Amino acid sequence: MVATVCGIGNLKPGPGTWGSLATIIVYYLLAFRIPQSATWIALALALAATVIGIPAATIVARESGRHDPGWVVIDEVAGQALTLAAAPFGWKYMILAFLLFRGFDIVKPWPIRRLEGLPEGTGIVVDDLGAGVYAAVIVLIVRHFIT
């Protein structure tokens, strides 16, 4: 249940995209009443998903015999939330954060692809945190020039 985020990882097509979308919905529901705390909420989501996601992803990877099972989407929660932490609270930035994170998570530019080689759940989650960092940097650059 943890690794698939309550079964979201079983949705088709693109379970990672569904996991990222679910993260944005949860983030919005938690932050819309206190948008001044949105950054802290996103960071707390990223931290929680990382702390519980690494062991959960490790268990699923071991039990399935797969290096990075596609139905594990707790890693998307961690990476997407990290990207959201860089964005001001608002729908335009949520869309930007979503698109950037999904793009970097799919393409996995250097050295993100190398992070997948870390053992078990660590590699599963940390490569998405890497994609989240790349996306967050772009969000911060956009913020600098737009706001």
Image (spheres, rainbow, N blue to C red):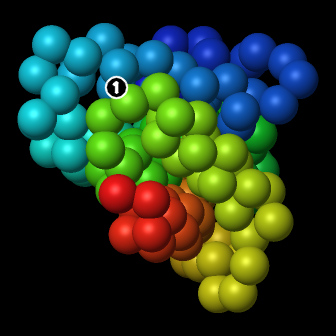
Residue at 76% across, 39% down: 70
Residue ID at (11%, 35%): 36
**Residue 16 x %, y %:** 70, 36
Crowding around mark 1 (Cα neighbors within 10 Å: few <14, some 14 to 19, many 20+) is many
Q: Position of residue 105 (x, y in %)?
A: 69, 58
The image shows residue 80, relative to residue 143, as above or below, that is: above
Q: Nearer the viewer, residue 103 or 92?
A: 92
**Quadrant occupied by the C terminus:** bottom left
Q: Position of residue 53 (x, y in %)?
A: 41, 43
Q: Is residue 103 visible?
A: yes
Kind of residue indicated by mark 1: Tyr
Q: Quadrant of residue 118?
A: bottom right
> In the orientation shown, which residue stands out farthest toward the right?
13
SS for callout 1: helix
In the rendered image, the residue lying farthest to the front is 146
Give the left or right position of residue 8, taking residue 11 as reference. Answer: left
Closer to us: 82 or 35: 35
Left or right, residue 7 beside residue 105: left
Q: Residue at x 61, y 53 (%)?
A: 101
Q: Which of 18/70 is in front?
A: 18
Q: Quadrant of residue 119?
A: bottom right
Which residue is at 44% across, 53% downward?
83
Left or right, 48 with respect to 137, comes to: left
Determine whether 51 is above or below 126 in the image. above
- The image position of residue 79, as x and y in percent, is 48, 52
Residue 123 seen by the camera = no
Q: How many marks?
A: 1
| Apparent side of residue 6 relative to residue 43 in the rendered image (left or right) | right
The residue identified by callout 1 is: 27
